[in-house]
Amino acid sequence: MKYDPIKDRLGALAEKHPALQRLLYGLLDLLFLRAWYVRRATRRLLSAYPPGRTIRVLDAGTGFGQYAYFVARSFPNAEVRAVDVKGDYLARAEQFARQTPQSAQLTFAQDDLTDLESDGPFDFILSVDVMEHIPDDEAVFQNFARVLRPGGRVLINTPSDKGGSGVTEADDESFIEEHARAGYNRAELEAKLRRAGLEPETCEYTYGPYGSAAWKLLIKRPMLMLNGGWAAKLLAPLYYAAALPVGLLLNALDVRRDNAEGTGLLTVARKPE
C-alpha cells in the first residue's frame, strides 16, 4: 500500500480549479495533526515581529505549497520564498498562488536544499516533513544556518525514531516511500543542528498516544481503502463520516498534551546573534 501515488493524484485533481486547491489545503490542515502543530508554532514565532516589519520566510520543501500560502495569508508583512526539487509540485503551487490576493508575497523556485541557491538572509525557515527524505541532512542544516539572519529561527517537523510512519513495515504494508531514514532521535537531531551552528530552543514530541491513534483512523486506514478495490473506495466516504469526529477529537487532545514520547518531532532552532 502506497501513499505517494494517491498524494500525486490529489495534487493533479486540485490544480484544475482554485476552489479545489483551497479545499485540498483545508483538508490537509484539518486531517494531518502535523499541520495543527506547525501552524500553532509558526503563528507564535512570527507574531513576535512588529506588524510593519517585513518577515522573509523560506518554505524549504514546499510540496503542495499549503504552508507558504498559510504564512502569506496569516501575515501580510511576510515575503515567502517556496522551494522544492519537484518541478510539478512547484508549478501547481505557483499556478494557484497567482490567483490569490497573496500572489505578490509568494515566489517559487526549484532548488535543492543540499546545494541551496536561494539568497538570504531569511528571518524564518520552515521545513515540514522534508528532512527524513534527504540523506545528507547535515549539508541542509549548514545551508539553513548560512542563509538565516542572526537571531532567525528554523522550524523542522519530522518523524521521530519511535516508529509509526510505516517506513519499516513489510513491503505490502509500507505506507511512506522515499525516506532516507525512518525518523530522528531527539538528541541526534539537536546535535546535528548544533554542529551546523544552530542552537535548539525547543524539541517536542508530537503524535503521542492520541495523535498516533488519529493518524491510523484518519489517514492510514482510509489510504488502505483507497488502494483497495472499488467496493472499498465506495465505502471510504461512509467510513470518514463515522471516523472524522473521533479523529479530530484525538488530534485536539494530542496538541493539548505534553507528550513524553511520540512518533513525530517538532524542533525550533535559532541562529545566534
Image: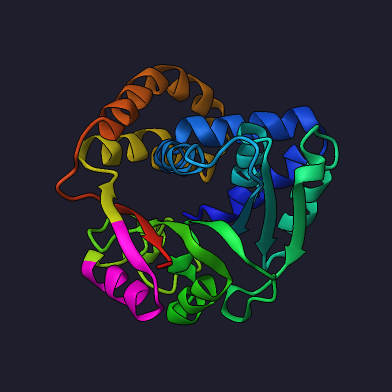
Instruction: Name the residue: 77% across, 54% down.
Output: 107
On screen, residue 270 versus residue 147, left or right, reads left
Q: What colour scheme does the image use? A: rainbow
On screen, residue 245 versus residue 185, left or right, reads right
> Which percent across, then down, holds residue 133?
48, 69
Q: Which residues are magenta?
A: 187-201
- In this view of the protein, can residue 267 be seen by the observer? yes
Most distant residue in the left direction: 260
Instruction: Name the residue: 81% across, 41% down.
Output: 103
> 50 or 259, which is in the foreground?
50
Q: Is residue 159 above or below residue 260?
A: below
> Which percent across, then down, holds residue 57?
61, 54
Quarter-of-image position of residue 77:
top right
Instruction: Name the residue: 32% across, 26% down.
Output: 252
> 16 or 171, which is in the foreground?
16
> Which percent across, then down, holds residue 135?
46, 79
Quarter-of-image position of residue 192:
bottom left
Judged by its main secondary structure, the magenta piece is helix
> Which percent across, then down, holds residue 48?
47, 40
